[in-house]
Amino acid sequence: MSNETEAQAPRRRLFVLLPLLVFLGLAGLFLSQLLSGRDTSEIPSALIGLPAPQTSLPPLEGVNLPGLDSKSFAGRVTLVNVFASWCAPCREEHPVLLGLSQDKSFTLAALNYKDQPENARRFLGDLGNPYQAIGVDPAGRAAIDWGVYGVPETFVVGKDGKIAYKHVGPLTPDSVKALLLPQIEKALAAPG
């Protein structure tokens, strides 16, 4: 019996140490992520550097603007903002979009996501309309093609028609200054 006990002792020690080793490994992984300095709130987009999805959305009825058509992106920098009237953060970012709309070096277009037309018109009527084009996506199919996680999101599309940058969440004055404007400037400087 003593031979079996001596043979089982290393197995028992391994059985006791295995959970500790797994815990230490996971703790090391989490610590390395925390200390990496990477912004964990940033969600990478698989579409960066790829052509913007082929999109042809009808205009918002009752607003005298064209719909959202990806063919119009060629040769100009376009910001595509995904918004909805039912989205509270969209309401928060709206003054920032109104400010951005004053810059005529790029086009500000919208993808109105899963919204009722009358609600979207009321939203824009109450808060102002910063957009030069508004495409309506009532079922959210185009948003899926764009890789939208939720609203609001804003994309920078370069003159070459490729997605250069994606901002998830509401734009703030700080995020525009630190993140969005440098990406717009980079896209404006790039050859078309």
Image (tube, rainbow, N blue to C red):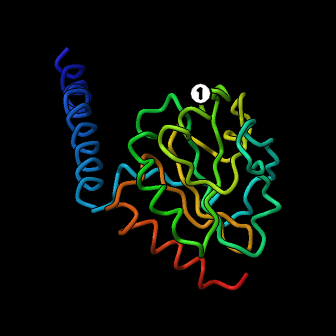
Q: Position of residue 41 (x, y in %)?
A: 36, 49
| Residue under pointer 1 | 119
Quadrant of residue 118 within the rendered picture: top right
Left or right of residue 36, residue 182 in this image: right
Left or right of residue 166, residue 75 in this image: right
Residue nearer the viewer, 14 or 52:
52
Q: Position of residue 36 (x, y in %)?
A: 28, 61
Quarter of the image with the C terminus is: bottom right
Q: In terms of secondary structure, where does tag 1 sit?
A: helix
What's the residue type where badge 1 is placed? Asn
Q: Residue at x 53, y 72 (%)?
A: 184
Residue nearer the viewer, 184 or 3:
184
- Residue 83 lies, with reference to residue 155, above or below; the image says above
Quarter of the image with the N terminus is: top left
Q: Residue at x 24, y 31 (%)?
A: 19
Left or right of residue 50, residue 100 in this image: left
Q: Position of residue 130 (x, y in %)?
A: 56, 54
- How busy is the neighbourhood of tag 1: few (under 14 within 10 Å), some, or many (20 plus)? few
Q: Residue at x 70, y 42 (%)?
A: 63
Q: Residue at x 78, y 70 (%)?
A: 74
